[in-house]
Amino acid sequence: MTKDGSNARKKAARELAAAEQIAYTEALRRVDQRTARISPTSEEPIAAAGAGQVTTRVSPPVAALTTDVVLIGHTGAVSCVAFGPDGRTLASGGDVTARLWDLATRQAISVLSGETGVISAAFSPDGGTLAIARPDEVTLWAIATGQITALTGCAGQVESVAFSPGGRTMASSEWQPPDLIDGSTQEGGTTTVRLWDLATGQATTLLSRQGCYAGRALAFHPGGRILACSPGMDGTLQLVDLATGQVITLTGHAYGIEAAAFSPDGRTLATGSCDYTVRLWDVTTAQTTSVLTPHGGYVVSVAFSPDGRILASTSTDRTVRLWDPATGQPTATLFGHTEFVRSAAFSPDGHTLATASMDGTVRLWTLREPS
């Protein structure tokens, strides 16, 4: 391996170690495993007739946007952002705090501190509650009263949380390292996806897979009946029918899926992976329709605009890419963050995109001027 290749390998391992909160040696092993399986610049051919057409899109040069709107307050890496449904409040999580921002003044109006870092956060559909995932717990923050309720029943490190469209249930994904499993000799650990009844605080285990590394992707279909989740880092995603228990497994990514998002009309699913690609799936057929190769790093977040006309993806390469999901064509690259971009969220009116980065900042990008 050349010196440049070795340096790139080490850089990728350092980024993965930070993203997954794992040891550098383990991250290096995963990078080597991924490199042996794929080339991030290779193109996937169109699928054979009868298997469903799959188109690979490679990014041409596109418009570059910058922003001067930066929300400062976090003292460490910022892992997640989420807009309140009224569009006036933004939540962000990172370091050891969750913060609520007034977007009119661009000031933090509430700060919730803890002993451990915030990994994921999600607003309830009515905006009254913010779910916060830390490595050791999930808490519900009642915005109006400030009351904090801890959910009991998690057995490992919580990776992500998501509310159902109706707001009556919440999903969480967690990973239990091997050294926390009594008598375990397995490699990887156990990933568990739970569904919480928020009226009772009780959880039901939907999926549990042993011998795998943490899966972060978690998203509800707009209809509320299907939950998309990654049960590990093997490149698969599972669609769970919450009414019947039926599970459909999506395969195609060469490495772990970090993020998933459904389009507002529920017809398309976008996934972002450590294989450097975004895939678009037809939800009805469970087949890939397009493979987008937008980044020079792991794709760790995907989000659709409220009208479904824009898809945003973020990466360890420090950029945000915007796409037209109907054509698979890129429309813009957003530069400004100085470390990798962990999360993205659209405002309810679709005019603004918020992004969170390991550089300790939250940025606001104006995509459309208010009419």
Image (cartoon, rainbow, N blue to C red):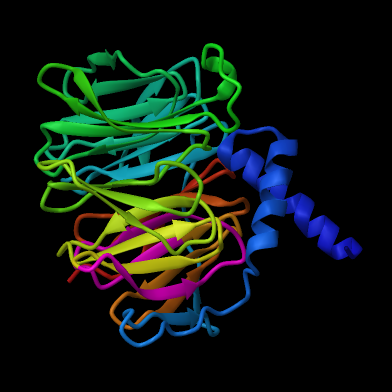
Name the foreground residue: 287 vs 349.
287
| Total marks placed | 0
Image spot of residue 194 (x, y percent)? 28, 29
Image spot of residue 176 (x, y percent)? 49, 24
Q: Residue furthest right?
A: 3
Would you say 246 lies left or right of 121 here?
left
Magenta part of the chain: 285-313
Image spot of residue 134 (x, y percent)? 43, 25
Name which quarter of the figure residue 145 lies in: top left
Name which quarter of the figure residue 359 lies in: top right
Q: Residue furthest bottom?
A: 49
Would you say 34 lies left or right of 89 here?
right
In the image, residue 355 sits, relative to residue 199, either above or below, namely below
Name the foreground residue: 303 vs 154.
154
Name which quarter of the figure residue 120 lies in: top left
In the image, residue 54 sits, relative to residue 92, either above or below, namely below
Name the foreground residue: 64 vs 136.
136
Which residue sits at x=50%, y=49%? 234
Q: Is residue 147 visible?
A: yes
Name the foreground residue: 14 vs 53.
53
Image spot of residue 3 (x, y percent)? 90, 62
Which residue sits at x=69%, y=32%? 23
For residue 360: magenta? Answer: no
In the image, residue 310 sits, relative to residue 170, either above or below, namely below
For residue 298: magenta? Answer: yes
Question: Which quadrant does the N terminus fall into?
Answer: bottom right
In the image, residue 41 sits, relative to residue 149, either above or below, namely below
Q: Is residue 355 visible?
A: no
Would you say 285 lies left or right of 359 here?
left
Would you say 128 lies left or right of 71 here?
left
